[in-house]
Structure formats: C-alpha cells, structure tokens
Image (cartoon, coloured by chain):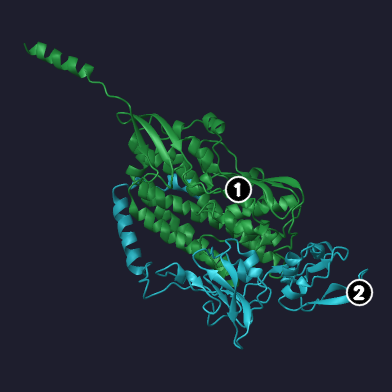
Chain colours: A green, B cyan
Amino acid sequence: MMERDLMDIRAETDELTTDKMWVIMGPQHPFSHGLWTLKVELDGEIITDAEPIVGYLHRGWEKECENRPYAKIVPMADRLCYAASMTYSHLYCMTVEKALDIEVPEKAQYIRVVSDEICRISSHLMWLAAVGTDLGNFTVFLWCMREREYWMDLFVRLCGARMTTNYPRIGGVRNDITDLFDRDVDRCTEHFEKSLWDIITLIDDSSIFVSRMKGTGILTREQCVNLGITGPAMRGNGVDFDIRRDDPYETYGKIDFEVPVMNDGDSYSRYMVRVEELFQSCRIIKQAMQKIRAIGKNAPYRLKVPTNVPACTAMCRLEDPRGESLMYLVADGSGKPYRLKVRSPIFTNVSASKPLVVGSRIADVPAIMAMIDMCLGETDR
Amino acid sequence: MPFMKVYPKNPARSLWVMKPLVKMFRFLGKTIVHRPVCILYPYEKMWVPDNYRGRPGLDFNMCVGCGMCVRMCPTSAIVLVDAPDDNGNIVKRPQINMGRCAFCGYCAEYCPIDAMTVTPEFELAEYTREDLIYGPRRLAYKGTNDMMKIQIEETLISDIKNGNPERRVKPFMIDRPELESAKCISCKKCEKVCPVSAIKMVEHGVNAKGRPILWPEIDDSKCICCENCVDECPKSALHIKEVL
C-alpha cells in the first residue's frame, strides 16, 4: 500500500512540468540604468532566452544635427551621454577638426586629455554607485557620489558647468585652465586615490558582492570580439585593446599609462578593470597637468576656424568610459553637416545582453547588466 | 598597477575575522572627525564660482541689439523684442525663455561687446511657464564682474604658421562683410539694419536711368561683425570675409 502511494506521488511529480515564461524587465525597472527593456524567457529561475529592446529615448539627434551650424552642435553633443558628456563633444570637435585638416594647439590637447580623464573618473564613479545600489549596498552609492562631487566641482572650476560641460570647441577648448583648477586638480587626485580604497574594500571584501559577481555573465574572448563589445567590458574578457594606447589621439601617445586587462570574462573582471582604470586615469591626469604647466600660461589653446567645412568625409574615434565611440561626418561644403553618424559603445554592448544573461539566474541579471555600464542617451540618440 | 597587484597581496586579508571590526571603527572615527558632506540647502548654499553658467544676464544700456546671441543660441531660446530704453526710445533687446535655455553660455561667449554675461543664479523655478520668460530688464544682474563676461580668446591659424602665436580677444570681430558690387541694387537695407551704424551708403556715379549708384561702405572701427547686413541683403551682394 505504502509503496503504491509513493509511486503515485512520483508519477504526479513527473507530470508536473512548467511552461517557459517571458518576463519583461523595464523600461522603468529597478534593474535598468535607463530607459530600455530586457525581455527574458525564464525556465523556473534560469534564463533561457533574452531580447533587448531599445529606442525609448530616441530623439533624432543625428537628423537634428543636419539643420544646425557646426558650432551649435557642440552643446548638443553633450546631451548624448549624461555621465560622460565631455567625451562626446570632444569627439565631435575632433571629427570636424579632421575634416578641416587643422591641428589643435598642444596645450588644448593636454587640457582635453585632462578633462576626458576627469570625465572618465566621474562616469566610472557613477557606475560604481549604481553597482552598489544594484547589489544592495547603499553606502557604496553614497560614498561614490560623495567622491564624484569633488570631480564635479573641478568641472565647475574648469568650465562653469557640472554636467553638460560644453567645453571643447572646434579648434581647441572654450577657456584656459584657471589657477584654482590647477591647484585643486592635484588635491583632488591625491584625495581620490586614497578614498577609492575605502569604496573598494566595501565591495571587494564583501563575500555577497563577490559571489554575485564572480562567475556570472561569462563571455569568451571570441564571443566578445564577434559581438563587437568594446571598452572595459571587452578588456575584462581578455582582449588587450585600448584606443588611447593603440591608436592614440590628442596627446595620449606622450603619456605613460597602463591598460588593465583581465582574462576571466565574468562580471568581477569587468569590475576590476574599471576600478583599475580609475587609478590609471589619476596617473594620466597628473602627467598631463605637469605638461600643461611646462607649456606655460600664455600658450594658445584655441584656434579660429572657418565657419564652413569643405566637402569631404571624416571619421574619428575615441575611448569613451564605456567603449569605443565613433563619429562619421559627411560635409558638403556648407556651414552645416550633410550627415553625422554616431557609433556608441553601449548600443553594441546591449545587443550582447542575450549571450551575457542566458544560462544565469534572474537574480544575477542586475549585476550582469550593471557591469555593462548602461547609458541609454547615447544608445538611442 | 596599484589595485590589481597590491590588493591580492594585502596582508590584512588573512585577518578576515578582525577585519570588519577594524574597518568599522576606522570608518566610524573618520566619520566623526570629518565634517558633514550634506548642506541644509535652502538655508545654506553651495559656493559657485563667478564663471558659473547659470542664467544669462544682460546689461541693458550696453547692449546694441545686434542679435548675435539670437544667432548663436542653439535652442532658439532668445528673441529680440522691442523695449523702451531710459530715454523712452524703442530699441531691440534680447528676451530669453528660460524654459528653453540650455545654459550653454554661447550668448555670453559670442556677445561682441560683453553686454550678455553668465550669472551664478541657478534657482529659477517658477509657477507658470510665462514667468520663465525673462524680458530685457529682468535679465539684469547686479554685481556683474569680469569673470562673468566670457571672452573668446582665439589664435589665428596664420599667426601660428608665421611663428607668432598670440591670443586675440574676440577675433571674429576682425571678419568684415565684403561687397560684390555687381550684385548691389542700392536698396540701403544693410545701412538700416546695422545696429552700430557702421554702414554708410556712398554714391558711386549715376546709373543708366539717372539715379545714383549707392554702395555700402563699412567703418571698420565700428563694425562688430554681427552679419545682420549679410542676412538682410536681398541680392546676396554681401558676404563675410573670414580672417584666418
């Protein structure tokens, strides 16, 4: 009798099958850093399929540019990415300068390097803050935001604005660095190198954090290259490539720094690469500031450029905090661009979300996608 | 590599039991000694530098109404409106819609006579959208200093080629409108539209119908290169010759 009962129960459990279920995460969801949807197919707790949907933030940026004079696109380029606004206006200016075939004064190039690296630090700190909240540690968020304020204050000293800096100009930068900036950039860098260790110890010594990050979101090196992933997400997968070192723009070729690479290919290695980049950025800032001081105060930093760009095409790329950003300009000889195309790193990285999350548990998705460092402003444009 | 190489070798890692306690007390001490990061916002305010790009400011009497700010505004937030000056005469002055303003600072940067400035004012909330429109008189800011008058300091490409690079303040003001005299129909529109009266129509003979041929002559000392004459010319006889 007893045996029969047990057999019946086993028979019932064998018949108990669950359907796969599509769960829509986003566009407004605590896991998503911005307006995008991740549709995941769940088999119990395991993700079997995923589909990213972008486009909620599309503003027609590229088309808007076709109706504007070249100078007026610089403030628009700031709006592409709210966390790293300087890199996009820098990239735009570099592209137009390439079309005009002019070389920017050396001082402006160093100032651009400094401002780009400050931008990278503030962007990475924002990412670290977001990682803290995603993984349930609000202290990390607060501390990162506190440190970020110092860099934001540097931006205010540099150009008078915190977020949408509108600082690079076609032919140089908006204004020279002030004495206050010169003084504070060193203080800020030294303070930051110490205080970053506090934040790192909070995350890295916590077994909850590490177990959530280690071994999740694994991509192989080949997958990473085939998907076109760039930036720290790529360097965390063992691909040793950085545009700042391998195809140097501005004066990065004259600056000594290292490109961190990790071979594990999981979320933890992406985290490690970004943290190491924070230290390396401080190193670059120190060197570039020394060079700026050596150049002197009265050196030119901005060129007067023609209003019209001759009919040509130009393409430029730079190392964004998130990866490789690229702009392609088609000029028709008038004062407005004929076509301006933006290649943003996160658009490609988002498309890799399927191989990233498939096979992992749904609770890992926030951690995996946080390590991609989303910014949907540049993705949807 | 400070992080990747140093951190795994950190001897403190072996003290995993004591470590959280030690760290907690260290941070506790730090927090007690450290001054607060937060400020009581409406009562205490953050310090902002003089060159902070808050709302634009305007010196009404200095402004000549050239419309350079209108031309350069990326969001078309600025329009020129009629306003009475101190003597009661109607003049053109900029009016800014703060709801549209992107706070890029172009208006202050490109103003040829530094009438437009940036100001450190950033608390601009209003109850209605109409209140966000700042007329020419409301744009005034007390305590304007030199840091707020953003100047363009550019170097000419030709100067660098000559080996004599120097920063020139407002170099776009050395560009001048050039006349293609064959196209000119002597309509005098350029003379009327010039905000600083730099254009004077000068007679150059008589045409086949016996009417005087008037061509604009530009006073270089007065011209601010606002390009209004170029835009106004119905026959596109004027164009800007850029000095590079």
| Residue A184 x, y percent position in the rendering | 54, 68
- Residue closest to the eye, A54 or B161: A54
- Residue B40 lies, with reference to residue B157, above or below; the image says below
Query: From this viewpoint, is residue B155 visible?
Result: no
The amino acid sitting under disc 2 is His
Labels 2, 1: one chain: no
* Most foreground residue, A280 or A82: A82
Write down the quadrant of residue A175 in the picture: bottom right
Check disc 2 and report its element: helix, strand or loop: strand
Say which element carries label 1. Answer: helix
Residue extending farthest front: B209
Write down the residue under mark 1.
A63
Chain for disc number 1: A
Instruction: For marks 2 and 1, give the CA distance.
Output: 47 Å
Residue A135 at x, y percent in the picture:
35, 46
| Figure label count | 2
Q: Which mark is residue B204?
A: 2
Residue A211 picture quarter: top left
Residue count near mark 1 (Cα–Cα under 10 Å), binned few <14, some 14–19, many ≥20: some
Residue A102 in the figure: left or right of residue A146: right
> In the rendered structure, which amino acid carries the disc numbered 1?
Lys
Picture quarter with the N terminus of chain A: top left
